[in-house]
Image (tube, rainbow, N blue to C red):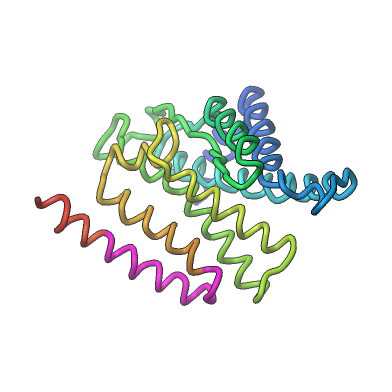
Amino acid sequence: MRNLLYNFEKYCSTGRYEAFGLVVSIALIAFMFSFRQWGTETFNLGLGLSNLIAALFISAIAVLVHVYAQKAVAISKGYHPHYRMTPYHLLAGVILTFISRGYLFFMPVGAISMQHLAKLRVGKFWYGFNFGDLSRVSLAGPLANIALALIARLLSGEPTGMLEAFIRLNILLAVFSMFPIPPLNGASILFQSRVLYVFSAAFIVAVGLLIQFANPFVTILGALVLAAAAWLFFIFGVENK
C-alpha cells in the first residue's frame, strides 16, 4: 500500500501540456452542457454566467475524477499515465451543440496514454505493454463517473438543481467515453475485448436510464441484469453465428 501511494505521488503529476488539455476540456464541456441555460425566453447574461460557473464546477469534478481514476489504475498496473485532450472530438462536439442549439451533446473527456515502466513491471506475467491493462485503465474513467452519479443520487434522495445536473453530466461523460471512436476509452476496450465492451457499455447505459427512476441499489442490480442479458445475447446471438 505504501509503495502504491509513493508511486501514485511520483507518477501522477500533471505536466503543463496535460494541465492545458484538462482546462480546455473542462471549459468546453461546461460550455456545451450549459448552452441552453442563458435564459428561458430571452437572453439573460447574469443567469447564463451563473449557470456556466456552476457547470464549470461540476465539470471539473467529473473530469478530474474520471482522469485520475484512470491514472491510479494505470500506476497500480506499472505504467506512467498521461492525459491527452482530443481537440477534434471536442470541436465536433461544439459544432454539434451550435447546430442543434444545445439539444444534442457530444462531450468526450479525452484519452489516457501509458508509458511502460520497467521497474514497476518486474514480476508481471506480461512484462511488456498489455492491451488488457489498457482496457482496464480505460474502463476506470467511465465507472468513476457512474460511481459519482450513484453517490450523488444516494445522498440527495430526489435530486434537484445542481445535484441533478451533476448526476446528469457524469452519466453523459460515462456514456460518451464508451463511444468506440479512437482514441476514446470505448475504442480501447472494444479493441481488447468485444464481450467486455458489450457488458460494460450496456451496464453504463442501463445505469443512466434507471437512475432517473430508481434508488442506487435497484439501479445497480437492474443494470447488472440488463448488462448480463446484453452479454448473453452478444455471445450466443452474434459471436456464435
Measured as percent of width and height from the top left, residue 197 is found at 32, 48
Q: Is residue 158 above or below residue 59?
A: below
Nearer to the camera, 121 or 158: 158
Q: Residue at x 37, y 37 (%)?
A: 187
Residue drawn at (82%, 46%), measured in percent from left and top?
48
Residue 159 position (above or below residue 93): below
Work out whether 158 lies above or below 5. Answer: below
Asked which quadrant contains residue 232, the reply is bottom left
| Residue sitting at the far top | 17
- Queried whether the magenta region covers residue 222, the answer comes back as yes
Looking at the image, can residue 6 be seen?
no
- Residue 203 placed where, x, y %? 39, 60
Q: Is residue 45 magenta?
A: no
Q: Which residue is outermost to the left?
A: 241
Quarter of the figure with residue 17: top right
Q: x, y percentage for residue 12?
A: 57, 36
**Range shown magenta:** 211-230
- On the image, the x and y values in percent for residue 102 come to 65, 44
Question: Chief secondary structure of the magenta span?
Answer: helix
Q: Is residue 10 left or right of residue 181?
A: right
Number of numbered markers: 0
Closest to the observer, 93 or 182: 93
Toward the right, the furthest residue is 46
Residue 228 in view here: yes
Left or right side of 137 for 34 = right
Q: Which residue: 39% across, 28% down?
A: 116
| Residue occupying image coordinates x 29% and y 37% | 191
**Image position of 135 with respect to 241: above or below:** above
